[in-house]
Image (cartoon, grey):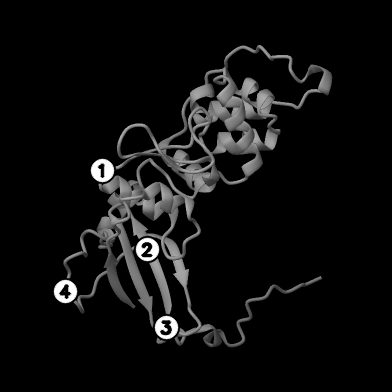
């Protein structure tokens, strides 16, 4: 394998680049992290502020992530949220669901992405509020629901990060590898920043989240992999000399056997 360090410089128009996804080699997570490393403030999706697209907020250099990044939320639902919000701000999750005509699935997608924080508090409270919603009959659809507030403790940071990736494909919290670095360093696993000035040919070890894996038809079997850690990205070129040793298993079959 051959490692190359890649430094991104997309901060001039991060919102536009995020709205152009999928754009090939660079994931939204890479774009957001590069923007943050260059001093750009990035705000999470929020039903009280976000449009469908990612936008530049009123303050210079502040990017508001759009509802388009939320897995499971349709553009039509996001459009209804925008229209209802223009009439007046949302009061609570029930008000949002009624006025934007959202299904429980829509609200769960928003809660999973932590996009209801302005209305319901931390993610656990958002999910609870979403789970309590039930679509009322047409006659009662405009009737507000007044229930006692339930205070749930915030999830641990690691759990929050996992849900961020599941819902958005990225996190604005610490990178997952930052939480694992104390366990990775004793294994001599370097960061992208550590390796930036390494000379060509130096043997090193790295790990990260695989954000890109490409095998172009014209590359003669070469696979290009991008590893992402808390300091940047590492491009890995996997040459064809990587061999499949499955035949060494011989008669040790990998399929299950039925003894009945």
For mark 4, give the secondary structure.
loop
Marks 3/4 in contact by CB < 8 Å: the verdict is no
Residue to which mark 3 is pinned: 242
Question: Which x, y percent locates residue 173?
Answer: 38, 40
Tell me which numbered mark, 3 or 4, is placed earlier along the sequence.
Answer: 4
Identify the residue under disc 1.
39
**Discs 2/1, front:** 1
Q: Earlier in the sequence, mark 4 or mark 2?
A: 4
Question: Which numbered mark, 4 or 1, is in the foreground of this view?
Answer: 1
Give the residue at mark 2. 227
Q: Pick whichever of labels 3 and 2 is earlier in the sequence.
A: 2
User: Could you tell me how far apart the alpha carbons at marks 2 and 1 are, in whole angstroms?
Assistant: 22 Å
Q: Are marks 4 and 2 in contact (CB under 8 Å)?
A: no
Please name the residue shown 34% across and 46% down the image.
179
- List x then y, in percent, for residue 242: 42, 83
Label located before the other in sequence (2 or 1):
1
Q: Which residue is mark 4?
A: 199
């Amino acid at each position: 394998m051959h490692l190359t360090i890649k430094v991104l410089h997309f901060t001039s128009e991060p919102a536009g680049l995020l709205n152009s996804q999928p754009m090939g080699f660079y994931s939204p997570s890479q774009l957001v992290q590069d923007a943050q490393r260059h001093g750009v403030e990035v705000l999470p999706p929020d039903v009280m502020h976000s449009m469908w697209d990612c936008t530049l907020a009123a303050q210079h250099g502040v990017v508001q992530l759009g509802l388009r990044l939320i897995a499971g939320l349709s553009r039509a639902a996001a459009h209804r949220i925008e229209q209802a919000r223009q009439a007046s701000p949302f009061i609570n999750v029930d008000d949002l669901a009624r006025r934007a005509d959202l299904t429980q699935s829509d609200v769960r997608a928003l809660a999973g992405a932590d996009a209801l924080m302005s209305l319901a508090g931390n993610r656990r409270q958002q999910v609870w509020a979403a789970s309590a919603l039930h679509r009322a009959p047409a006659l009662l659809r405009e009737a507000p629901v007044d229930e006692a507030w339930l205070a749930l403790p915030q999830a641990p940071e690691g759990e929050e990060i996992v849900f961020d990736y599941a819902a958005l494909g990225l996190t604005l919290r610490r990178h997952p590898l930052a939480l694992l670095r104390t366990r990775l360093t004793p294994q001599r696993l370097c960061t992208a920043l550590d390796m930036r000035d390494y000379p060509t040919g130096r043997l090193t070890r790295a790990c990260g989240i695989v954000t890109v894996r490409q095998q172009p038809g014209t590359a003669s079997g070469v696979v290009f992999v991008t590893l992402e850690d808390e300091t940047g990205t590492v491009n890995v070129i996997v040459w064809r000399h990587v061999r499949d040793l499955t035949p060494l298993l011989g008669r040790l079959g990998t399929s299950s056997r039925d003894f009945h």
